Amino acid sequence: MKVRLYEIFTSVEGEGILYGTKTLFVRLAGCPFKCFYCDTKEALPMTSGKEYSIDEAKNLIENSLAKNTYKVNFTGGDPLVQSEALYELAKFVQQKNIPTYLESSCFDSTKFAQVLPHFDYIKIEFKTIDSEFVDEDHYSKLLENELQCLNLAANSGKVTYIKIVVSSRTKIEQFKQLLDSIFSITSKSKVAGFIIQPTYGMAEPDLRQLLEFYDAVYTYYEEVRIVPQLHKFIGAP
Ligand code: SF4
């Protein structure tokens, strides 16, 4: 089995409920989608990065682990695209007693279910329809998969949190419909956080919009937070 890695590096976690933690990022190459705000466009082609055998990739991870690393974040691209290799690498890290963290758009609940046993922290990223992730015809299929992934992760007892990127294009009514779907299938006691992340550098939402999104989530989940990407402010990758 082979895996295509775009890059591997230690930095500060810039997003989500564990922002600020020293993290080894393993960025897998490849994502077939097209979010307009994507900040890793260079890692989207399946031909980007470099191909390794699984043993070579394990050695690379082992040799890249700095002291005091809080967790290993498998990111992309979308790491689920290479789910079999992801399974092997996450299992390897877990066996070293280092927490594993999955960053994915959760576009495929079958692949997600396969890798889930080897992840400790799960970020379920729900895409809004304005993200341009997929076209309108395919959006309901994406949402179905994301909801199934949320259900699987929350019921597995793993630390599961939700993230939604919002922009000035995000419509509050569509955002509320998304929340209805999310909280109709999961109880808030099973969710470890809800992050609203504003886009940075393009179509940025203003404070009025952000507070509207916050209020909409607060109706369901009081521990909602608006958190911009920290690493953009400290010049970290
Ligand atoms: S799913 Fe993630 S990696 Fe893929 S285009 Fe969207 S933001 Fe970029």
Image: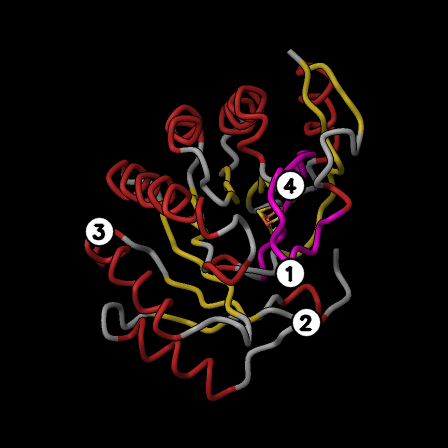
Q: Which residue is mark 2?
A: 202
Q: Determine crowd level at label 1: few under 14, some 14-19, many 20+ residues with C-alpha closer than 10 A.
A: some
Q: Is residue 190 left or right of residue 70?
A: left
Q: Earlier in the sequence, mark 2 or mark 4?
A: 4
Report the colour scheme: secondary structure
Instruction: Report the Cα–Cα distance between label 1 and label 2.
Output: 7 Å
- Please name the residue shown 46% across and 80% down the image: 210
- Disc 2 marks which amino acid? Met
Q: Nearer the viewer, residue 12 or 232?
A: 232
Q: What secondary structure is the stretch in magenta mostly built from?
A: loop
Cβ–Cβ below 8 Å for labels 1 and 2?
yes
Q: Is mark 1 within 8 Å of ligand 1?
A: yes
Q: Which residue is mark 1?
A: 37
Q: Earlier in the sequence, mark 4 or mark 1?
A: 1
- Label 4 SS: loop
Q: Is residue 217 left or right of residue 137?
A: left
- Label 3 SS: loop
Instruction: Report the Cα–Cα distance between label 3 and label 2.
Output: 32 Å
